[in-house]
Image (cartoon, helix red, strand yellow):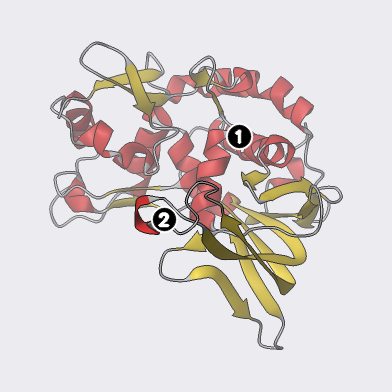
């Protein structure tokens, strides 16, 4: 695995063409007050947001977790995270799967304040001092390395005045261009009482739906300059790059069923837009290299790597 072409680059830009695994239609992400996010380019080209950056962050995190073993994926075991258990010790959730990572209320808002007190001590800055992002990066490496890639906002006033915020180092989203609307619909049939009270779930209920056709592209941006700005041990940078590439490769291989009506497939190889001379390692290479990279960065992790927090309301 050769990461040398990335040494002096500020960004790594990757693109992947996608297509429906069957047929031509797909269902994009939707928003309660907006519906599908359609927009026009300055030249009038119709565009569609298929998957937002927020949703993609969740999907890239999910591919790192082995739900059967309730642990990191095998190649990532040994990485730090925070595990939340109930009063009886049963696992409830963890910082990898929580939408706001370390800022999860199950980590910071329960009766167990031990982890919160650790963060207060390790992120302590003066009331009028600027937020120290290098201090935050060091704490994230120690407790939740995933947050170094996907960002975090510790919005509690007693944690450095609520000013500890780290932007995403890894950003991903999916767009479609030259879109057209595929309008369709259906009916929920009630063979016993077609004219029944639909408010109670009876009766025939017709409905309409909109799907789309278009050219779909997934975009991945890794901010290498931000990672270097963390000023962490030199062993951390290759770990974070390999972890980001693992997420991307794993998502493109196994995570493309975004919704029932949005099951996608790769339509060609993963393309590198910047730097042009970089060849991204395949998933097998990454899985072979990552255990060694985890061990090299281990001195910066908590001991044990998994920090347990008990959640009680």
How many labels were placed on the picture?
Answer: 2
Of 3 and 178, which appears nearest the observer?
178
Residue 304: which quarter of the image? top left
Q: Is residue 16 visible?
A: yes
x and y, in percent, of residue 211 in the image: 66, 64
Of 174 and 29, which appears nearest the observer?
29
Q: Which residue is mark 1?
A: 243
Of 12 and 71, which appears nearest the observer?
71
- In percent of the image, x 34 and y 42: which residue is there? 136
User: Compared to 41, does 175 lie above or below?
Assistant: above
x and y, in percent, of residue 164 in the image: 29, 49
Give SS at disc 1: helix
Q: Which residue is mark 2?
A: 196
User: Compared to 166, does 211 lie above or below?
Assistant: below
Few, some or many residues within 10 Å of mark 2 (<14, 14–19, 20+):
some
**Quadrant into which the N terminus falls:** top right
Residue 113 horizontal side relative to residue 48, left or right = left
- In percent of the image, x 61 and y 17: which residue is there? 74
- Camera-near label (2 vs 1) is 2
Residue 11: which quarter of the image? bottom right
Given contact means CB atoms under 8 Å apart, are the residues at marks 2 and 1 in contact? no
- In percent of the image, x 44 and y 24: which residue is there? 80
Residue 236 horizontal side relative to residue 157, left or right = right
x and y, in percent, of residue 32 in the image: 42, 64
Name the disc covering residue 214, or none.
none
Residue 85 horizontal side relative to residue 161, left or right = right
């Amino acid at each position: 695995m050769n990461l040398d072409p990335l040494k002096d680059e500020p960004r790594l830009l990757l693109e992947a063409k996608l297509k429906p695994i069957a047929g031509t239609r797909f269902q994009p992400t939707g928003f309660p007050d907006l519906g599908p996010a359609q927009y026009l380019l300055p030249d009038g080209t119709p565009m569609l947001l298929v998957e937002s950056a927020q949703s993609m962050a969740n999907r890239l995190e999910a591919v790192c977790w082995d739900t059967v073993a309730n642990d990191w994926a095998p190649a990532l075991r040994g990485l730090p995270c925070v595990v939340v258990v109930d009063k009886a010790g049963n696992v409830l959730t963890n910082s990898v799967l929580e939408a706001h990572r370390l800022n999860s209320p199950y980590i910071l808002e329960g009766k167990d304040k031990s982890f919160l007190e650790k963060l207060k001590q390790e992120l302590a800055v003066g009331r009028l001092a600027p937020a120290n992002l290098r201090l935050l990066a060091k704490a994230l490496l120690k407790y939740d390395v995933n947050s170094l890639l996907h960002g975090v906002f510790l919005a509690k006033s007693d944690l450095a005045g609520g000013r500890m915020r780290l932007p995403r180092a890894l950003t991903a989203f999916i767009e479609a261009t030259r879109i057209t609307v595929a309008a369709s619909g259906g009916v929920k049939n009630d063979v016993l009482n077609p004219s029944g009270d639909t408010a109670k779930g009876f009766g025939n209920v017709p409905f309409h739906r909109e799907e789309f056709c278009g050219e779909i592209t997934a975009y991945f941006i890794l901010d290498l300059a931000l990672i270097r700005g963390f000023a962490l041990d030199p062993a951390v940078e290759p770990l974070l790059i390999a972890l980001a590439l693992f997420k991307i490769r794993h998502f493109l291989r196994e995570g493309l069923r975004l919704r029932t009506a949005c099951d996608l497939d790769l339509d060609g190889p993963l393309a590198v837009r910047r730097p042009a001379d970089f060849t991204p390692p395949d998933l097998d290479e990454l899985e072979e290299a990552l255990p060694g990279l985890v061990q090299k960065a281990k001195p910066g992790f908590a001991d044990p790597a998994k920090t347990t927090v008990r959640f009680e309301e």
